[in-house]
Image: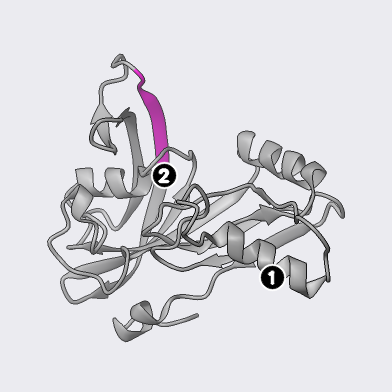
Amino acid sequence: VAKPAGLPTMGVAADQLSLLDLAKDYIKHRYHKPGNVYLGVVSRLDAPVTGVVLIARTSKAARRLTEQFRTRAVEKTYWALVEGRLDPPDGPCVDWVAQDERHRRMWIVGPTAAGAKLARLHYRQIAELPNSSLLEVALETGRKHQIRLQLAHRGHPVLGDRKYGSRLSWPQGIALHARRLVLTHPVRGVSLQLLAPLPAAWLRFGVDQP
C-alpha cells in the first residue's frame, strides 16, 4: 500500500479514517468479504511521511513478515529531500537515540543514557536541487523518527520537518518517502520488491520519477 502524507496508518480517533480503514474497505469490496476483515499492519510510517506500508491479509503472514523485520531481513530504502549539501555526499550515520515522550520527539544521546538505542543508516546523494539535496537512504535499524533526527543532527533537516528544524516549507507532510521494500513473500518464499511512486509534490519540485 502506498501511504499519502497526513493519513495515519492506524491509531486515530473513531470518527477519522486511517490507511488501515481504507485497506479493509478495499479488501471487503474487492473480494466480497462478509463481516469484519482481518488485516495486520506489519510496517508503519509517521503521519507526515509517504510511501510503502506493508499490510498482511492473514495472521500467519503477519507473523512471518514481522519476523523478517525483527531479524533485519527486509531491505528498506527511503528518499529524502534535505536542506543544503552533504559533505561527504555518501556515508553512514551512526548514533545513539532516545525518546522524549513529553515532547513527542527523539534526541541524539550518549550510549549510556537512559533508554539509548543504536541507530544506523547509510545515505547517498543522488541529485542536487536548489537549496537542497535528494538522498537515497538505506535504513539499517528502525528507530522512531530515525532518518529525520539523524540528518537534522548533521545540519540537513528534511524539507518541511519543523519538529527537527527545517526552515523550508513542503506542500503536505514532509519530504520523506518510503520508496522501496525488498522482502520474502510469507507464503510463496520468493523475493518481492515493493516500490511506491513519488507523490505529485516531488515531481513539481523537479525530482524525476525513475
Residue 11 location (% of width, % of height):
49, 47
Amino acid at the residue labelled 2: Leu
Q: Which residue is the site of mark 1?
A: 26
Helix, strand or loop at label 2? It is strand
Residue 156 location (% of width, % of height):
21, 54
Amino acid at the residue labelled 1: Tyr
Q: Which residue is the site of mark 2?
A: 121
Q: Based on the picture, tell me whether residue 118 belongs to the magenta stretch.
A: yes
* 26 relative position to 122: left or right: right
* 84 relative position to 74: left or right: left
Distance from disc 2 to disc 1, alpha carbons, whole Å, reads 34 Å
Density class for disc 1 (Cα within 10 Å; few <14, some 14-19, many ≥20) is some
Q: What kind of secondary structure does the magenta stretch mostly adopt?
A: strand
Q: Residue at x 75, y 51 (%)?
A: 38
Marker disc for residue 109? none
Q: Based on the picture, tell me whether residue 200 belongs to the magenta stretch.
A: no
Of circles 2 and 1, the one toward us is 1
Q: Quadrant of the N terminus?
A: bottom right
Q: Earlier in the sequence, mark 2 or mark 1?
A: 1
Helix, strand or loop at label 1? It is helix
